[in-house]
Image (tube, helix red, strand yellow):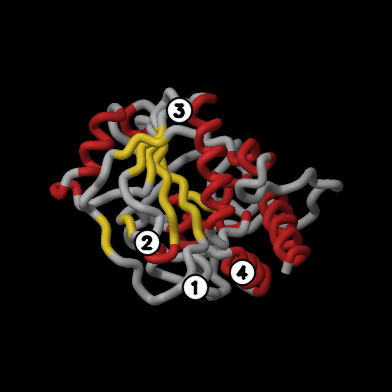
Amino acid sequence: MKIIERPSPNFNERQGGGPIDILVMHYTGMPDAESAMKLLTTVEGKVSSHYTIDEDGTIYRHVAEEKRAWHAGVSSWGGADDINSRSIGIEIVNPGHEWGYRPFTQPQIGAVIELSKGIVKRWPITPARVIAHSDVAPERKIDPGELFPWDELARHGIGRWPGALKAAPAASTLGVGADGEKVKRLQSDLARYGYGIEITGLYDERTLIVVSAFQRHFRRSNFDGIADAETQAILADLLNQLDAVA
């Protein structure tokens, strides 16, 4: 695997002394690769990532994995809120929803898989902690978006994916305005998986946004933020996967 060095000045030392145990996937959301890499590698940009993967599969390294790149911004996962200090960030070239969102290329995804396999071997990153920018910052971000093939990555041991639902889900649909114990259970389950959400028992706007982020990752055909029976069944399956390896 060839990696081209394109250093960024935008990094610092990791804070807090915690492990590097999260891998975050992004899309660049810029008109082209060069615009994105210029932003990531100049002082004026004030952002960076550890790697960028171009549409032809070329991998660029901007920041050493040991250092803290500036890719996640205000974010949280699993109770931690300085995600930059405990994560590695991969930017994947794609115009994003603002500039003409399109499917990722097979050379890109092949490179993502190959690079990620090495990363999760070098650091204690479990499959459930290979996540999207939209997972750690659901109110601000939607990347890498609903066209990112998380299922393909999971087949290679990169990230989690739900199994086939063995029976028709029977849970009642929950949406904005719902309240009570069922909403508390949903919020608790989302928090247990890692999402930053308060357990209020009220299906508020924040809950809608977090559910939409969950769906965008794990049920990409419909990410309306309504916790229908299928969404709840997928979440239960993923939690069962977590429990099986605990």
Q: Position of residue 133 (x, y in %)?
A: 43, 51
Of the residues tagged 4 and 2, which is closer to the observer?
2
Nearest to N terminus: mark 4 or mark 2:
2
Could you give the CA–CA distance between mark 3 and mark 1, rounded to whole angstroms? 34 Å
Which labelled disc corresponds to residue 79? 1
Of the residues tagged 3 and 1, which is closer to the observer?
3
Numbered disc 4: secondary structure: helix
Q: Is residue 133 left or right of residue 193?
A: left
Q: Is residue 160 left or right of residue 130?
A: right
**Residue beneath disc 2:** 84
Q: Residues within 10 Å of mark 4 (few under 14, many from 20)?
A: some
Kindly tell me whether residue 16 is visible in this rendering. Answer: yes
Could you give the CA–CA distance between mark 4 and mark 1, rounded to whole angstroms? 9 Å
Give the amino acid type for the residue marked by disc 2 in the picture: Asn
* Residue depicted at x 42% and y 26%: 55
**Residue beneath disc 4:** 192
* Residue depicted at x 41% and y 50%: 89
Kindly tell me whether residue 183 is visible in this rendering. Answer: no
Q: Position of residue 34 (x, y in %)?
A: 25, 29
Q: Residues within 10 Å of mark 3 (few under 14, many from 20)?
A: some
**Residue 246 falls in which quadrant of the image?**
bottom right
Nearest to N terminus: mark 3 or mark 4:
3
**Residue beneath disc 3:** 57
Could you give the CA–CA distance between mark 1 and mark 2, rounded to whole angstroms? 14 Å
**Residue 241 falls in which quadrant of the image?**
bottom right
Give the amino acid type for the residue marked by disc 1 in the picture: Gly
* Residue depicted at x 41% and y 75%: 17
Q: Position of residue 87 (x, y in %)?
A: 44, 59
